[in-house]
Amino acid sequence: MLRFLIIRVLSAIPILFVLSLVTFLIIQAPPGDYADSIATMLVNRGGASLEVAEQQAQAYRLAHGLNDPLPIQYFNWLWGIITRFDFGDSLYYNKPVSAVVLQRLPPTIMIALTCHLLATGIGITLGTIAATRQYSWIDTLFGVISFLGMTIPRFLLALIFIYILAFRLNVQEIGSFFSTKYGGAPWSWDKFVDLVRHVWPVIVIATFGGLAYNMRVMRGNLLDVLNSQYVETARAKGLSEGAVILKHAVPNAIHPLLAYQGVALPYMLTGEIEVAIVFGLATVGPAIVGSMGVGDVFVTSTFMLVLAATLIVGNIIADILLAVLDPRIRLGGAQE
């Protein structure tokens, strides 16, 4: 098992390197940089002429190495990550990128993990219920829910929620994690309840799509497994239907969903990011949009690299779960 895990971790290193390179080049592709944003702000505020603004922008480029060739900028950034775990300085936020990541990433991960656990648990449960009641009204209802969850864009759901909360229910302080009185207060049960009151729309919307997918896949897999010969044999031995389903059918039907866990967490992260942009929460999504808008490449590159790393970590976790559940996978990886 240890050999299997080491092989998976080592194989992820070159993938991360390639992803970092591709991400950096894509972000650098659009014309302009953060110095151009500075020049534009100076002119728009009326504090400088075009010539003076361009001179200040050029001085900023020289001071921060923005005039260096792209390969040098990339390798300086990558070398800082490898040797000092330094992701550079944010030009837009005027502080180290690591500080921006530590501020924005934990709430993003918290919401994404919550959505992932809810989507997996509820989706598998509803899929099992739908499969064991095939063609009933419950199966039809769950089918409609899964269809809506997989087709309705999350940003559209977010806009609908904001309209209902703001204009119909007169909910205040949308777009924040806490009410004003709890913003700087120490953690307590009341503060946790206040957090839930503010983030539940984001969790519901981001969970909906993953729940629908898990429910649909679990229903289809379980229906196939229930028609297998070993399930008929278990029934012929006199086992109750509940024991047949829970002990024999569900563990085998869940294999594809475990493999899907490799992309489930990144899927939930992108869902949270998409919804958080609409709600304006202080998470990764608005930070990516804001940094891309002004050409702050280090913040954008770092966040994209972190999202790529979650995809790799998710696949490693999925491999471990499958290896624990199915020894043939573990032995096959060790034989390689």
Image (tube, rainbow, N blue to C red):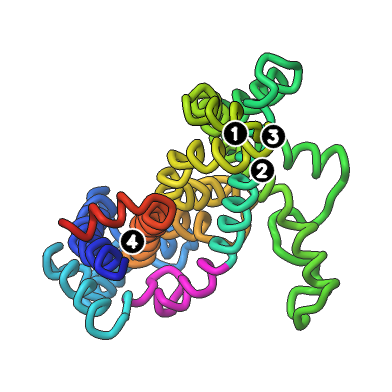
Question: Residue under circle 1?
Answer: 215
Callout in the foreground (2, 4): 2
Residue 141 x, y percent position in the rendering: 72, 21
Name the amino acid, label 4. Leu
Magenta span contains residue 90: yes
Earlier along the polypeptide chain: callout 3 or callout 1?
1
Residue toward you, 43 or 230: 230
Q: Say what secondary structure mark 4 lies in.
A: helix
Question: Residue under circle 4?
Answer: 305
Mark 1 surroundings: few (<14), some (14-19) or many (≥20) residues within 10 A: many
Question: Residue under circle 3?
Answer: 240
Asked if labels 4 and 2 touch by Cβ distance under 8 angstroms, the answer is no
Residue 233 x, y percent position in the rendering: 53, 28
Q: How far, Cα to Cα, is label 4 from label 3?
A: 50 Å
The answer to whether any part of residue 300 appears in the image is no
Q: How far, Cα to Cα, is label 2 from label 3?
A: 24 Å
* Residue 122 sits above or below residue 160 on the image: below
Q: Which residues are magenta?
A: 88-106
Q: Say what secondary structure mark 1 lies in.
A: helix
